[in-house]
């Protein structure tokens, strides 16, 4: 098999390349660095082995020679091995050494380039590395202290490039920034030359410090940081740090299979999301036997209506039908936009969607019987619909489509939740199970609920509810978070 040397990009998980995501999706083993964003590991199969070899300042968890040996040994098996490296594997990432070791051992490998922090981090800070009238070139140098770059880099030549219209980008130079500034000034750069230093660039915790070359040595900086020297560093085209939720930490309690849409929306507004799946979606207790029988009955035109109360019920029932034609003349009701969108993915247009995404509104919108209604739902659900439909003259077949079980978030996620700015609840089960796995003592100061039923459950549990979404959808929930945090 092949060893893939994959550039993970500078931090924002959205910056990994399509090819990088493709090979991660079929990895048997992922060997990853400290600077690789943890959520990127979720792109690998759940059963893939993950080995951290990440380096932190002054410490390496695994020597480079041992990393090379590991890649060679595992590359000789029939496994797909992904070496996930921050930035680009061939830009100050020792990917060349790993490729050389694999080549010498006769192990096939492929290099998947990544977006280097030398370009992406300044861009996220609003600093273009080239700009008409200010910079016609850029030079990337390492400031690493072991051995210190001053012993291997012609800093006078770098300074001359800077003085003649070039931008200087220094990677891994926080510890040696004072010495680097001194050498650049000695080489001819003006002490007042603008400097922008960006820590954790492209990530939610990004922080930009603006200073000058003369003051760089005394600037309060921590690794990892990308340092940009030159007139372009005086530009302030910031966009990333000005997004409405930038710097805010939001807990997402949805099941991991369902969280992506909410996580993507919050991250798009600048938030750091803490995924704490308080629930997990499990198969029904009978393994789906009753659901299979219900699908057969649908195809036989047994029902006048099929009522879907969540996207989960759609995802569980529809794959059991041959296709959308199996519904025939059967009416299809959906509780809200999310459920409607799930039906659309199967080529089904809902015949009835209430104005408000709650069971009571759906019940009011449905006509009276007689006739037969199929109601697939969670194992534990409110009885509003079955009881109300029966009262309206319908014969109701309630079928268990799935179960929500308590999630098992990591200790790190539980600890992170306690430091967050807000928490989102998307169902009553997320409220109950969050309290079961995390406890009220880890509750963030702001509580946002997707709708009134979820909010009632939270209040009944003694939790303060700050905001309830006006529209009981993911977009409505995100708007509610912004409103709650004054964004």
Image: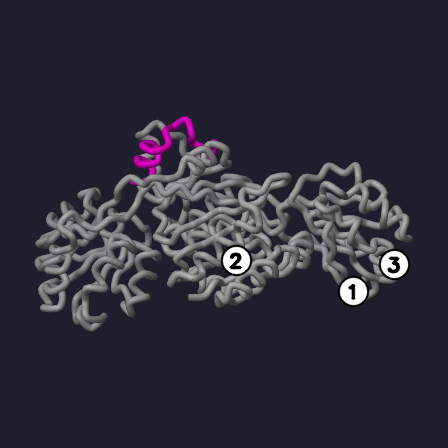
Residue at image coords 45%, 66%? 2
Which residues fall within the magenta stretch?
Answer: 429-446
**Residue 469 in the figure: left or right of residue 227:** left
* Residue 437 is one of the magenta-drawn residues: yes
- In this rendering, is residue 165 above or below 280? below
State the CA–CA distance, disc 2 to disc 1.
Answer: 27 Å
Query: Can residue 409 be seen in the rendering of this structure?
Result: yes
Q: Circle 3 is placed at which residue position? A: 160
Residue at image coords 9%, 68%? 300
Q: Give percent across and percent down for residue 100.
A: 58, 63
Q: Circle 1 is placed at which residue position? A: 137
- In this rendering, is residue 74 above or below 433? below
Helix, strand or loop under label 1: strand
- Dividing the image into 4 quarters, which one contains the N terminus? bottom left
Q: Residues within 10 Å of mark 1 (few under 14, many from 20)?
A: some
Which quadrant of the view contains residue 290?
A: bottom left
Q: Are marks 2 and 1 in contact (CB under 8 Å)?
A: no
């Amino acid at each position: 098999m092949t060893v893939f040397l994959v550039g993970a990009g500078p931090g924002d998980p959205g910056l990994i390349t399509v090819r990088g995501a493709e090979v991660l999706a079929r990895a048997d083993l992922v060997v990853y660095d400290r600077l690789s964003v943890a959520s990127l590991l979720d792109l690998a199969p759940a059963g893939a082995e993950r080995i951290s070899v990440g380096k932190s300042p002054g410490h390496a968890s695994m020597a480079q020679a041992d990393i090379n040996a590991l890649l060679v040994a595992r590359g000789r098996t029939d496994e797909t091995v992904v070496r996930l490296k921050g930035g680009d594997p061939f830009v100050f990432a020792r990917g060349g050494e790993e490729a050389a070791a694999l080549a010498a051992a006769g192990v096939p490998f492929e290099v998947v380039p990544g977006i280097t922090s030398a370009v992406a981090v300044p861009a996220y800070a609003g600093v273009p590395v080239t700009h008409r009238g200010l910079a016609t070139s850029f030079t990337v140098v390492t400031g690493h202290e072991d051995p210190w770059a001053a012993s291997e880099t012609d800093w006078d030549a770098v300074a001359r490039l800077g003085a003649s219209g070039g931008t200087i980008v220094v990677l891994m130079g926080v510890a040696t920034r004072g010495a680097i500034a001194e050498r650049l000034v000695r080489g001819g750069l003006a002490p007042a030359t603008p400097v922008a230093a960006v820590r954790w660039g492209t990530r939610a915790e990004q922080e930009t410090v603006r200073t000058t070359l003369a003051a760089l040595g005394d600037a309060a900086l921590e690794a990892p940081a990308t340092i940009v020297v030159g007139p372009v560093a005086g530009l302030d085209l910031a966009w990333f740090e000005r997004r409405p939720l930038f710097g805010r930490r939001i807990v997402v309690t949805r099941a991991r299979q369902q969280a992506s849409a909410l996580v993507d929306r919050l991250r798009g507004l600048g938030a750091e999301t803490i995924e704490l799946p308080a629930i997990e979606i499990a198969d029904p207790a009978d393994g789906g036997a009753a659901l299979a029988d219900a699908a057969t009955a649908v195809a036989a035109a047994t029902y006048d209506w099929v009522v879907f109360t969540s996207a989960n019920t759609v995802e569980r029932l529809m794959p059991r039908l041959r296709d959308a034609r199996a519904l025939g003349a059967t009416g299809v009701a959906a509780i809200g936009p999310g459920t409607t969108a799930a039906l659309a993915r199967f080529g089904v247009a809902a015949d009835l969607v209430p104005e408000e995404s709650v069971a009571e509104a759906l019940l009011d919108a449905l006509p009276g019987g007689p006739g037969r209604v199929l109601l697939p739902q969670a194992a534990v659900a409110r009885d509003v619909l079955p009881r109300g439909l029966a009262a309206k003259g319908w014969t109701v077949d309630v079928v268990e489509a799935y179960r929500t079980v308590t999630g098992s978030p990591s200790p790190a996620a539980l600890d992170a939740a306690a430091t967050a700015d807000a928490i989102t609840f998307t169902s009553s089960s997320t409220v109950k199970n969050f309290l079961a796995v995390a406890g009220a003592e880890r509750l963030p100061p702001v509580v946002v609920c997707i709708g009134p039923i979820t909010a009632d459950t939270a209040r009944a549990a003694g939790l303060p509810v700050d905001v309830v979404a006006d529209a009981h959808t993911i977009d409505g929930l995100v708007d509610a978070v912004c409103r709650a945090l004054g964004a």
